[in-house]
Amino acid sequence: MKPTIAILAAVALAIPSLASAQTVYVRPATWFNPSGAAGAPFSNVRASLCAVPASGTLHMSGGYFNETLLVTQPVTFTATVGSPSRVGEPGIDRTTLKVFSFNTHLFGNVIPFVPFWEDGARAGAIAGYLNGLRLQGVDLVGLSEIWDADYWPDIRDNCQYPAGGYGGRVDSGNVMNSGLAVFSLHPMLGGTQVSYNDASGNDANASKGYLRQTIVKDGFSIGFWNTHTQAGNGSSNVSDRALQLAQLAFDMNVYRQANPSHIVIAVGDFNVDGGSGEYTGTMSDTMGGTAATADVALNVACLGSSTHCTSCNDNDLHEFFNGGGGGGGGTRLDYVLYGNSSDGTVRMVPRVYEWRRPLAPGNISGTGWAPENGGTRSMTSRHLSDHDAVYSEFDIVRN
């Protein structure tokens, strides 16, 4: 057991009038998109310390912070009056959790004239990449856009994860399945494919929705959702995406009420620009409010690539399909969201958030179809999708 630091309000009192950019706020309960301000506090002490300016103040709301600290510069700790905070590693049990999310863009031969480029070769390389993640001990994987079901058996078998599931059902009136798949190093219970009630444009041809399952690792139960929501920025797209987020958040809320000791993870291509008002408004209200989850990227903002694009202009396949000449910039569309158990007995402490670009072991060369960028084109690249991936690590602690 590591030493526990007690920060008592009787010793250091917070004075509200002193709150400023010099003061960073943290509390054990999660906030969806924290900034460290009093009204949007962090939940991770390590990340909060990173955000405190030199000789600044870290103000802690009462409770247990199941973390160890390394303080490398002068900082003042304060606490809420009458609400002591404890920092250390208390807890009956603890384990770790590694999570990976990736949009694969594997249309294959589902319908004619959709954008593709060497999908079969990329599917094989993706399976090999996932096998590497398995060997590295990545616990949970969420994939989207495996539209062609013919790729699923090879990916499943060659990545060698012991548990997995595929949302291959095609709903009545649609021509495509959900494109979603999940893998786990641990037992999966009750896997379910749920379709969204609302969709528009080309997305109305797909059975978009989410996969929901329960994972058990080291005695901890984890609700795990993988989703792919409505694409596009037109008014109907944004409206339908809001309805989809509300449906997903409601499902998570129902699950949490039925399983109050379970922690929750939601991953996928949410198609919400991380720098937009839709993110701070609709997504925060539904996934932060109703679902009671938090965006791991912003909760460890100082410790990783929190605002890095996942639909990036310098990605070879992104340029191949969309044009624009490459270069910098792009949009963050892919997320890992997490939530503590609703009964307060299990806490998730985010430790790592990384942007990753999955690569094939060697160059892939071939011709593909890019209807929005000149039609038939050729390319050589190691990039495995037009999206990049996100990866997170957590400590899981039972108090």
Image (cartoon, rainbow, N blue to C red):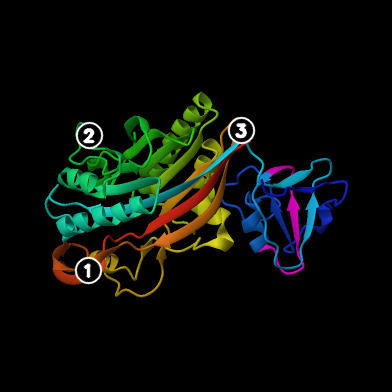
Q: Which residue is mark 2?
A: 169
Q: Is residue 222 magenta?
A: no
Q: Is residue 174 visible?
A: yes
> Looking at this view, is 207 or 301 the one in front?
301
In the picture as drawn, the residue positioned furthest to the top comes out as 258
Q: Disc 3 versus disc 2: distance between alpha carbons?
A: 36 Å
Residue 232 shows in the view: no
Q: Is residue 45 above or below residue 204?
A: below
Q: Secondary structure at mark 1?
A: strand
Residue type at mark 2: give it.
Arg
Percent position (x, y) of residue 86? 74, 45
- Tag 3: residue type? Thr
Q: Are marks 1 and 3 in contact (CB under 8 Å)?
A: no
Magenta-drawn segment: 51-64
Residue drawn at 68 percent across, 46 percent down: 27
Q: Amino acid at mark 1?
A: Gly
Question: Residue at the spot x=66%, y=51% of the render?
Answer: 41
Which residue in the protein does label 3 denote? Answer: 345
Cβ atoms under marks 1 and 2 closer than 8 Å = no
Q: 83 or 91, which is in the foreground?
A: 91
Q: Which residue is mark 1?
A: 362
Q: Determine whether the residue tagged by mark 3 lies in a helix, strand or loop.
A: loop
Q: State the image coordinates of residue 355 (x, y, percent, origin top left).
A: 43, 61
Quadrant housing the N terminus? top right
The crowd level at tag 1 (other Cα within 10 Å; few <14, some 14-19, many 20+) is few
1 or 2: tag closer to the N-terminus: 2
CA separation, marks 1 and 3?
47 Å
Residue 40 x/y as whole percent: 65, 51
